[in-house]
Image (tube, helix red, strand yellow):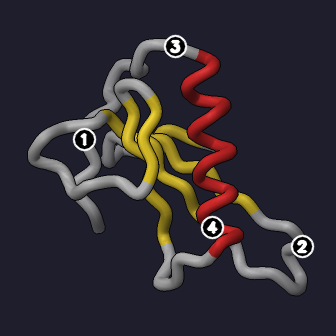
Amino acid sequence: MQMTDAGYLSLVLTEDVETKPQLEIRISRIAPNAPAPPQGAGPYAIYYAGSRYDAAVGRALAAVAAVVEKNGAPPPPGMTAYAGR
């Protein structure tokens, strides 16, 4: 997990590096001019990098959103709205 220069937090999940593709989850601030996120949690928008959205991606986004919302921490300095790639 790392904060990027692009203003969002990047979290990479993988079950098995050898056989499963990775899922990159991007957490940024919610903003009215940003693309609609597939998941939100308080002041955060939660996106994913990948071309497919399936049940496993949905469960991962929901799990991350639950942790983020329960944490309740304010957005860190430098976090901005995600504008996409």
Residue type indicated by callout 2: Asp
Q: Which residue is nearer to you in this view: 9 or 47?
A: 47
Label 1 SS: loop
Q: Nearer the viewer, mark 2 or mark 4?
A: 4
Q: Are there few (<14), some (14-19), or many (20+) residues within 10 Å of tag 2?
A: few
Give how far apart the Cα atoms at labels 2 and 1 are.
31 Å
Tell whether 67 sits left or right of 27: right
Residue where numbered disc 3 is placed: 73
Residue where numbered disc 4 is placed: 57
> In the image, which disc is placed on residue 16?
2
Give how far apart the Cα atoms at labels 2 and 4 are.
15 Å
Label 4 SS: helix
Label 2 SS: loop
Count of numbered labels shown in the rendering: 4
Give how far apart the Cα atoms at labels 1 and 3 are.
17 Å
Q: Are there few (<14), some (14-19), or many (20+) residues within 10 Å of tag 4?
A: some
Residue type indicated by callout 3: Ala
> In the image, which disc is placed on residue 81?
1
Q: Looking at the image, is mark 1 or mark 4 earlier in the sequence?
A: 4
